[in-house]
Amino acid sequence: MQNKVDSSIVKNIISLLETCTESFAFVYDIAADTFFISERTLAHYDLPGAQFSGAARTIITFVHEDERVRCSGDIESIISNKKNRIKATYHIRNRYGEYVSVEIRMLHLSVSSRDIVAGSIDPAEKHPFFEDENLGSERDAQFDFDTARMDAGALSGFAMQIEVDNLISISERVGFEAGNEILSIVADACKRQCVDDTKAYLFSGGKFLLINFSGGSVDEIRRRYSGIKQSIRDAEYASGYKRVFTISAGGIAFINDTSTLTEILAKLVFTVDFARKDGKDMLELFNAREYANYLRALEIESAMRDSIKNKFEGFTLLFQPIVNAKAVGKSNSEKLSKIVVGAESLLRWKNERFGTVGAGEFIPILERSGLIVPVGRWVLIKAFAQCAAWNTLFPELYVSVNISFVQILQSNLVSEVQIALERTKVNPKNIVLEITESGNIDDEEIQSVLAELLALGVKIDIDDFGTGFSNLRYLQDIHANTLKLDYTFIQKALTGDMKDLKIIEFIVGMAHALGMTVCMEGIESYGNVEKLLPFGPDKFQGYLFSRPVDARTFAKENLHT
Ligand code: C2E
Ligand code: MG
Ligand code: MG
């Protein structure tokens, strides 16, 4: 066990570092998993406090989601001393909730058998901002907008935001001058569109805004975008293709609209992000339905944060029986007979404002926000404790827990499972972790996490097989216990032609040959059972046997001594 570092010493180190540099300093105590920063840093960045524990995990949630995997990798390398110094650029949230580019340096130090990481945070954008005196500023845009609103009341027209794709990495790779040259090409292209009452503005961070209040349309937006693209192509040609780059844009047309500029800009930011996610180099038009979904997801995320702070109020676990396929039958009185071998734990979330939200909606929000890490930890404890309680009378019954990939990437899943095993005293042989089949399951790092989990004595099932990315190649490396064939896949085979059933036959055969059992999910009728039994499944799960129910109902309906 390593010594913890005396926190007063750490605070002295930080203030010493900060008196000799303009950087924001931090110290990370590896043994205590605690992060220390100065009050000055706290005033700049959205971090939970001057000193916080559970740090390796927490810190990741302040980094932009696109960079979290890279950042976890860097943290892992510096903690394990695989690398003893790292310099990297990330976007982290400032205290206004905006992501800003920062350069982070980390150094692994061993001081008389205490291991710490000392580091600094520097704002990356110290270069002079690109300016163009012929373009209005943010303040000018607000002034023009307010004037137009005062004159006309509701506004009709269009707004378009334009951004250079990968501007930050271009600037980092070839220098800020190159970045600024590109911005100046886009600035000229925008200025050329300033006809028929259209005005162009330059916002901080190299964002351009075109706005028109004289009744534009979606077609007008498309025309302006093509015009800008043409100007950029001309400039590229004229410069002998010295600078080649792409732009993404978001546009919105409005009629008799009374939104504020801030509201319009928020919609544009969302729309440009959409263009980026769709592969960049394109114009995306505002979609009110998508935006409403996005706002709802943000609100659900914030309500779930409150739930978590409130001792996970609103979260519950339900259990659905998994039955032995070979023992399913019907008695003479048509009563279904079944032998329950396991229970899958399924998370639910309920909230006063949103009511019961489906797992299909809230799980992806938990994953995107990183909140699946604390919630997943809670699920592990609850499910393991329930399993331990049931095992006193039913020592063979197992409980399976769904694990999201984000938990593997953003937390130390192995130690969390280990802690939950120790706390609940459940026998690891009764625990199954369900891992969703996905593109990165054969990633080396993930394989090693899976191997460590198996070493703890728990089992691993492959969930959702047959949806999306079905990679047969990795199956043999994982040493999975059961292959769970997804509901949609099973139903498709049942309603499809013989070809689909042939695929099921092949997959069951392959899983058996690799030493795995097969669980077919989504069994809704006895007819399904009769049709699927010839393919030799080992287990069934589905509404025919029971819907997911609370633990007490599960025991009452399925566990008999
Ligand atoms: P899954 O792990 O494949 O779970 C099976 C889903 O199929 C459950 O949906 C279950 O209610 C549903 N199901 C079971 N039998 C039938 C049937 O006969 N017909 C139909 N139509 N559906 C059936 P649910 O509870 O909505 O969960 C959806 C997904 O959310 C789960 O799919 C799992 O991937 C995820 N999930 C649920 N709980 C957790 C959790 O605690 N952690 C994580 N990371 N993911 C979870
Ligand atoms: Mg599952
Ligand atoms: Mg499944």
Image (tube, helix red, strand yellow):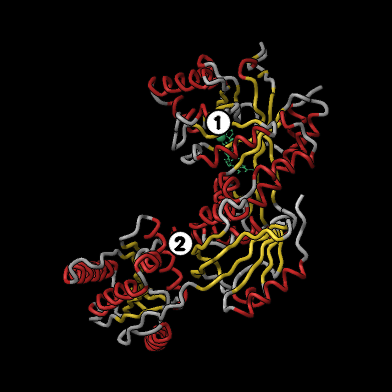
Q: Are marks 1 and 2 in contact (CB under 8 Å)?
A: no
Q: Amino acid at mark 2?
A: Tyr
Cα separation, mark 1 vs mark 2, equals 40 Å
Query: Label 1's element?
Result: helix
Is residue 550 positioned above or below 331 on the image?
below
Q: Residue at x 59, y 19 (%)?
A: 538
Please state the quadrant of the image where ligand 3 appears. Answer: top right
Residue that extends furthest to the front in the rendered view of this protein:
112
User: Which quadrant is the C terminus positioned in?
Assistant: top right
Q: Position of residue 134 (x, y in %)?
A: 30, 86
Frontmost residue, 90 versus 85: 85
- Give the percent coordinates (x, y) of residue 434: 60, 35
Evaluate whether residue 244 shows in this view: yes
Residue 107 appears in which quarter of the rendering? Answer: bottom right
Label 1 neighbour load within 10 Å: few <14, some 14-19, many 20+: some
Query: Regarding mark 2 in the picture, which secondary structure is present there?
Result: helix
Q: Kindly report which numbered mark, 1 or 2, lies closer to the viewer in this rendering.
A: 1
Q: Nearer the viewer, residue 264 or 157?
A: 264
- Disc number placed over residue 84 in the picture, else none: none
Which residue is painted at 46% across and 24% down in the image?
494
Q: Amino acid at mark 1?
A: Ile
For the question of whether residue 304 can be seen, the reply is: no
Q: Position of residue 228 (x, y in %)?
A: 24, 71
Mark 1 or mark 2: which comes first in sequence?
2
Q: Pointer 1: what residue?
A: 478
Q: Is residue 336 left or right of residue 490?
A: right
Label 2 Cα crowd, 10 Å radius (few <14 / some 14-19 / many 20+):
some
Q: Dot 2 corresponds to which residue?
A: 291
Q: Nearer the viewer, residue 154 or 263?
A: 263
Q: Is residue 496 left or right of residue 95?
A: left
